[in-house]
Amino acid sequence: MLNANIPWQQNHKYLEVTLDKNLHFRDHIARVRKTALFYRARLGAMLGRKSKLSRRNKDTIYKICIGTVMTDASPVFAYVALTALDRLQVIQNKFCRSATNAHWCVRNSVLHRELELPTISKYMKDALKRFFDIAGSLSNALLNAAVNYEPPPSSHFIHKPRNVLNDPPDALTVVVESLNDVNDTHD
C-alpha cells in the first residue's frame, strides 16, 4: 500500500476479541484469563477466605467484575475447544472455593450449587441460545440465515464449526444440574 510493505499478522484484535487465522481463540482466552486473574488478585481481600463479606456480596462482586470479563463476547468464542474453556473454569472454581471458605475435599459441583453459579460452558451455551433467539427475531436476512444454519452430519469429515447448542454438557455441568434437581425435589 503506497509502496510500503504491510506486515503479516498472525492475529488481530477486533472489538476486544482476538482473532487468529484458525479461529482457535487461544490468544483471546489467554488475555481474558490474565485479565480475570488480575481482577481476582486486586479483589482478593474482599473475595478471600478471611473476608467478612457475605457470600451474596462476594457472588455479586464476582459476577460484576470477574464474570463479565471472562464471558464478554462469549457467543463469538463459544465454539472453542473444551480444554480452552477449562482454563477459565479453573478461575471460577478457585473463586467458588475461596468465597465459600470450603475445605479442599469439597467438590466443585457442590460449591457451584451453593453459590447458584453456572459453569462457564453452561453460561456460554445459555448466552449463545439467547443470542440466536434474539437474532432470529430480527428482520435482517443475514442474521436469519446464520440462525437457520444446520451443521454438517456428524459423519462428515469437517469437524468445525461445532454446534454448541447440541453438544452434550461437560461433566461438571452434569453433576451441578443433577445436584440442583435433587435439591429441588427435596424442597
Image (cartoon, grey):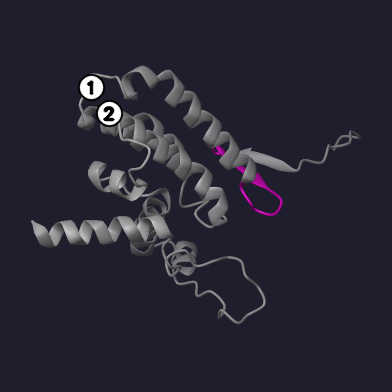
Structural crowding at the residue carrying mark 2, measured as other residues with C-alpha within 10 Å and reported as few (<14), some (14–19) or many (≥20): many
Residue on which the image places disc 1: 53
- Which part of the image, by quadrant, shows the C terminus? bottom left
* Residue 38 % position (x, y): 49, 24
Q: Who is closer to the viewer here, 164 or 8?
A: 164
**Marks 2 and 1 in Cβ contact (< 8 Å):** yes
* Residue 83 % position (x, y): 56, 52
- Please name the residue shown 51% across and 48% down the image: 86
**Amino acid type at mark 2:** Lys
Q: Is residue 137 visible?
A: yes
- Please name the residue shown 22% across and 31% down the image: 55
Q: Is residue 22 magenta?
A: yes
Instruction: Compare marks 2 and 1 and give the one earlier in the sequence.
Output: 1
* Residue 135 % position (x, y): 39, 59
The secondary structure type at the circle numbered 2 is helix
Structural crowding at the residue carrying mark 1, measured as other residues with C-alpha within 10 Å and reported as few (<14), some (14–19) or many (≥20): some
